[in-house]
């Protein structure tokens, strides 16, 4: 029996690789992927996640856009650490 999993990502290149590895391993029943801001904005993370799942032909995995604001603590964003889309484009 596969382990059930929900991935929570801010899909830049690092999380894109993680999603690919999790899907391709076929060891997990990935119920959904939720997105947050971090390495990239929330909108970009959501778009990147959809692009990766489309690339993998995985239309059955739901992508759920998270809340734009944190529930507590100071807002966090590391958007300057990666290229504009976070996927290492020139």
Image: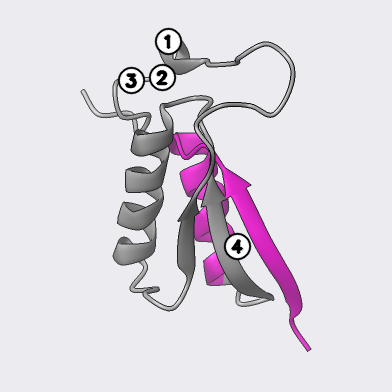
From the image, tell me which residue sits under label 4. 22
Mark 4 Cα shell of 10 Å, populated few (<14), some (14-19), many (≥20) = some
Residue 15: percent from left, percent from top: 53, 42
- The image shows residue 30, relative to residue 84, as above or below, that is below
Residue 36: percent from left, percent from top: 54, 37
The numbered dot on residue 11 is: none
Q: CA–CA distance between discs 3 and 4?
A: 24 Å
State which quadrant residue 72 falls in. top right
The earlier-in-sequence mark between 2 and 4 is 4
The numbered dot on residue 80 is: 1
In what element is the residue under mark 2? loop
Q: CA–CA distance between discs 2 and 4?
A: 22 Å
Label 4 near label 2: C-beta < 8 Å? no
Judge whether residue 50 is colored magenta.
Answer: no
Mark 3 Cα shell of 10 Å, populated few (<14), some (14-19), many (≥20) = some
Residue 71: percent from left, percent from top: 69, 29
Side of 70 relative to 39 (left or right): right
Residue 78: percent from left, percent from top: 52, 15
Side of 45 relative to 57 (left or right): right
The numbered dot on residue 82 is: 2
Question: Which residues make up the magenta segment?
Answer: 1-24
- The image shows residue 45, relative to residue 80, as above or below, that is below
Single out the mark in the foreground, 4 or 1.
Answer: 1
Label 2 near label 3: C-beta < 8 Å? yes
Q: Nearer the viewer, residue 51 or 37?
A: 37
């Amino acid at each position: 029996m596969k382990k059930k999993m929900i991935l929570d990502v801010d899909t830049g290149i690092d999380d894109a690789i993680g999603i690919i590895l999790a899907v391709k391993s076929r060891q997990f029943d990935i119920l959904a992927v939720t997105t947050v801001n971090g390495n990239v904005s929330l909108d970009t993370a959501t778009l990147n996640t959809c692009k990766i799942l489309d690339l993998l032909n995985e239309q059955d995995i739901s992508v759920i856009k998270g809340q734009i604001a944190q529930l507590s603590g100071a807002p966090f964003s590391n958007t300057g650490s990666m290229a504009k889309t976070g996927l290492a484009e020139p």
